[in-house]
């Protein structure tokens, strides 16, 4: 997803975007550790997606970790 697309997300959608990106990175790391991951560039892409989402959230003053914790309660 491009930066302009991430900027266009609502605050709750942005938090969900970061959560999904973190979950994807976890799954990719698990696949890599078990030798099932063929496209290792996907790890880099997932890390950059997280960074992109966190950068936009930080610019808006959103604490993503706090929001995710609040949603899980």
Image (tube, rainbow, N blue to C red):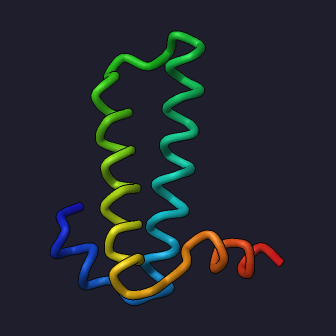
Q: Is residue 68 left or right of residue 63?
A: right
* Residue 47 position by quadrant: top left
Answer above or below: position of 51 versus 3.
above
Q: Residue at x 50, y 85 (%)?
A: 12
Height in image: 48 above or below 67? above
* Relative vertical location of residue 43 with respect to residue 50 in this rendering, above or below: above
Instruction: Report whether 41 appears left or right of 70.
Output: left
* Quadrant that contains the N terminus: bottom left
Q: What residue do we see at 56% from left, 36% from top?
A: 27
Please give the count of numbered marks on the rendered protein. Answer: 0
Residue occupying image coordinates x 63% and y 79%: 67
Residue sticking out furthest to the right = 73
Residue at horizontal 18 percent and vertical 64 percent from the top: 2
Relative image position of residue 33 (x, y in whole percent): 57, 16
Q: Quadrant of residue 68?
A: bottom right
* Image quadrant occupied by the C terminus: bottom right
Image-quadrant location for residue 51? bottom left
Residue 29, position in %: x, y? 53, 29
- Locate residue 32 relative to residue 65 in the image: left or right: left
In this picture, is 10 found above or below 3?
below
x%, y% of residue 17?
44, 68
């Amino acid at each position: 997803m491009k930066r302009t697309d991430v900027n266009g997300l609502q605050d709750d959608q942005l938090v969900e975007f970061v959560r999904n990106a973190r979950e994807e990175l976890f799954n990719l790391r698990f696949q890599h550790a078990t030798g099932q991951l063929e496209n290792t560039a996907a790890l880099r892409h997932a890390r950059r997606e997280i960074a992109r989402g966190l950068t936009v959230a930080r610019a808006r003053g959103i604490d993503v970790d706090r929001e995710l914790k609040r949603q899980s309660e």
